[in-house]
Image (cartoon, rainbow, N blue to C red):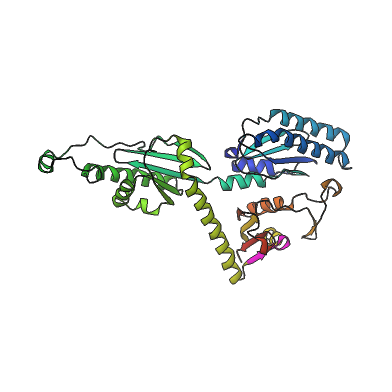
Amino acid sequence: MDSNDLTPEVLRSLRKQRPYPAVSLTMPTHRHEPWSDQDPVRLRNVLSEAVHRMEADPDVPKATRQAVRGRLDEAVAEVDLRHKLDGLLILADAEEHQVWYLPRETPESVVISDTYLTRNLVAATVQRHHYWVLNVAADHATLWSGVGDSLHEHRADGFPATPSEATWDVERLERVGNPPSNFMDEDTRKFMRSVDDAFTAVLAASPRPFYLVGVAPALALLEEAGSTARSATGRLAKGGLTDGPAHVLAKALRPLAEAYARDEERQVLVQLDDARSSRTFAAGLDEVWEAVREKRAGLVAVEEHFQRSARVSEGHLIPVDGADGAALGREVQDDIVDELVESALDGGAQVVFLDDDVLAGHERIAAVLRY
């Protein structure tokens, strides 16, 4: 499965408590050679670590360990390393297993708990923003629906669109000796107005950020036709992409998407700074944990690969160090950050994942409080 399959109902099912041990394996994968050659080795390594951890855990009976190992073996056999994105997540307990392909890099890790690790799925879903791409030319307009790097043409709601048969001004042609410019012709202006009207209706039904693509005169004419185009997230002044193909269009849009992601990160950092000024700010694992438990967190920002093992004691977190989680014991959460993210979502908070070291001054995690 990929992260597009993660509905709220599926996420709730994954986050429910399970008989111990529930095993979550994550690892980065590579889309292209020669780096992809190492992926099978990585997969065997994380599987071996999970088996070692269970064998060293006195809380895991032999029969349970064998059952979980069987589900893990089934999952590994099911993995199709030709169907690669940027990360792999395997979930297994004594009764079931799941394989998820993620469009984002994940660390190599083994987490053993009484719940599955879901932060990577949540982060992938958050990262894969849905957006529109309106691609215009003087005589043709297409609309594309995008999520992450994936695009497909939206063939409904008036798209693809073409103008009615143009009627040239014969007298003008005889007077100046050449046909009017496509972008000066009134029929083209009418066509752009109809495109603007159709796209405005699409946005009203399904609001998303959107990008405009086309040669500069076409984009200028579209902006003149109505007000919708002026609120575009980004513009790509390039022709020849009206009919895609999808992968070429997605590649051309990547710089705009990356700029949008950087802008979103800046907005989050501004929110955190404003919260510090208004004293509605929490930083550090224990402070944010407490705010999340009390449902006071409106936004939680966490670095992509921040992970800590911790023990919960009287409502506070006691960090537990150690490179080998096998010695930590069942009462220790291998990744308490994952549990915090789940609790934040349950409390209605927005969760955002930022690049590593962006929150170094706030102990890798921070929150904007509702009060």
Lateral position of residue 17 relative to residue 3, left or right: right
Residue 268 percent across, percent down from the top left: 56, 59
Q: In the picture, which quadrant includes the C terminus?
A: bottom right
**Residue 81 shown left or right of residue 265 in the figure:** right
**Which stretch is magenta?**
281-287
Tally of numbered discs: 0
State the image coordinates of residue 200 (x, y, percent, origin top left): 36, 47
- Depth order, front residue of 177/269: 177
The answer to which of 235 and 141 lies nearer the viewer is 235
* Residue 240 is at least partly visible in this image: yes
Q: Quadrant of the N terminus?
A: top right
In the figure, 206 relative to 1: above or below?
below
- In the image, residue 345 sits, relative to residue 182, either above or below, namely below
x and y percentages locating residue 211 in the rendered image: 42, 47
Is 282 inside the magenta-drawn segment?
Answer: yes
Determine the residue located farthest toward the front in the rendered image.
34
Is 305 in the magenta? no
Q: Would residue 113 be seen by someone viewing this image from the given angle?
A: no
- For image coordinates 69% across by 28% down, the residue present is 78
Quarter residue 303 falls in:
bottom right
Query: In the visual, does 168 lie left or right of 35?
Result: left
* Image quadrant in which you'd find residue 75: top right
Q: Position of residue 342 (x, y in %)?
A: 67, 50
Residue at 67% x, 44% y is 106
